[in-house]
């Protein structure tokens, strides 16, 4: 395991969560659908908790949470771009556009966030038994993984249905993903990890 790169990655993951808090706060200013507002408020609180969890991870591993890395700077720039997009959409006066742009911004942010937590889970699984880094990351991963699956899966559904409504099609609110929960992405991820292990062994 490349320890230096792992430290940089964890700083990047923390910055992703911090940016996620800002993105959800801005998205809520664009939201009009009451069910969507309720969901984003819930996800905002969970994302704030994820910031605390990753800060605790860094503390346990002796990582400076305020250090600047190239990765964290790039993540911050991406978040700022998404925030600017929402601001432009709000200022246009088109509330329908603003809500769609917000849903897309959240989906973009959650895609990166989900990738981070997949990698955290992968590192924890591949760490040697008894390795402190693996134990710390596994504990954090178990607290967050289900929420991250839900965030990325449900937000993609909302973005799609908001677009469908805007395009004059019959939209489904809340999206079908709400009833499916996180079963579909978890099954898909499980299959991916199985195939990954097989390819490593071959």
Image: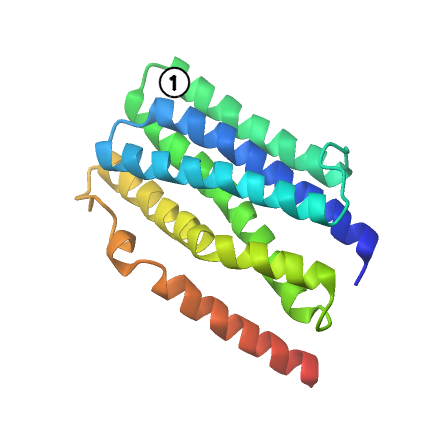
- Does the image show residue 98? no
Q: Quadrant of the C terminus?
A: bottom right
| Farthest-out residue, bottom | 202
Q: Is residue 32 positioned above or below 120 on the image? A: above
Q: Is residue 179 positioned above or below 192 on the image? A: above
The answer to which of 159 and 148 lies nearer the viewer is 148
Q: Quadrant of the N terminus?
A: bottom right
* Residue at figure coordinates x 50%, y 54% from the top left: 143
- Does the image show residue 124? yes
Would you call the spot at circle 1 few (<14 residues within 10 Å), some (14-19), or many (20 or more)?
many
* Drawn side of residue 106 relative to residue 135, left or right: left
Coordinates of residue 37 in the picture (x, y in percent):
30, 32
The answer to which of 126 and 86 lies nearer the viewer is 126
Residue hosting label 1: 90
* Drawn side of residue 100 relative to residue 61, left or right: left
When asked about the image quadrant of residue 99, the answer is top left
Coordinates of residue 74 in the picture (x, y in percent):
68, 35
* Residue at figure coordinates x 56%, y 39% from the top left: 51
Coordinates of residue 8 in the picture (x, y in percent):
76, 45
The answer to which of 94 and 174 lies nearer the viewer is 174
* Residue at figure coordinates x 43%, y 51% from the top left: 147
* Residue at figure coordinates x 27%, y 43% from the top left: 161
Q: Say which element carries label 1.
A: helix
When asked about the image quadrant of residue 78, the answer is top right
Coordinates of residue 187 in the picture (x, y in percent):
41, 70
| Farthest-out residue, left | 170
Q: How many marks?
A: 1
């Amino acid at each position: 395991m490349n320890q230096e790169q792992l430290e940089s990655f964890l700083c990047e993951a923390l910055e992703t969560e911090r940016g996620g808090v800002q993105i959800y706060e801005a998205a809520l200013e664009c939201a009009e659908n009451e069910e969507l507002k309720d969901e984003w408020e819930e996800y905002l609180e969970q994302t704030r908790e994820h910031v605390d969890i990753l800060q605790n991870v860094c503390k346990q591993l002796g990582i400076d949470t305020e250090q600047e890395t190239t990765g964290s700077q790039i993540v911050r720039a991406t978040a700022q771009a998404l925030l600017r997009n929402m601001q432009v959409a709000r200022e246009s006066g088109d509330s329908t556009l603003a809500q769609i742009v917000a849903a897309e911004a959240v989906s973009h942010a959650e895609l990166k966030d989900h990738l981070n937590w997949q990698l955290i889970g992968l590192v924890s699984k591949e760490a040697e038994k008894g390795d402190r880094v693996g134990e710390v990351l596994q504990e954090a991963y178990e607290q967050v993984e289900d929420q991250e699956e839900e965030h990325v899966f449900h937000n993609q559904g909302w973005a799609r249905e908001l677009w469908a409504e805007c395009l004059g099609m019959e939209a489904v609110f809340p999206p079908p993903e709400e009833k499916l929960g996180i079963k579909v992405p978890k099954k898909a991820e499980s299959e991916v990890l199985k195939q990954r292990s097989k390819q490593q062994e071959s």
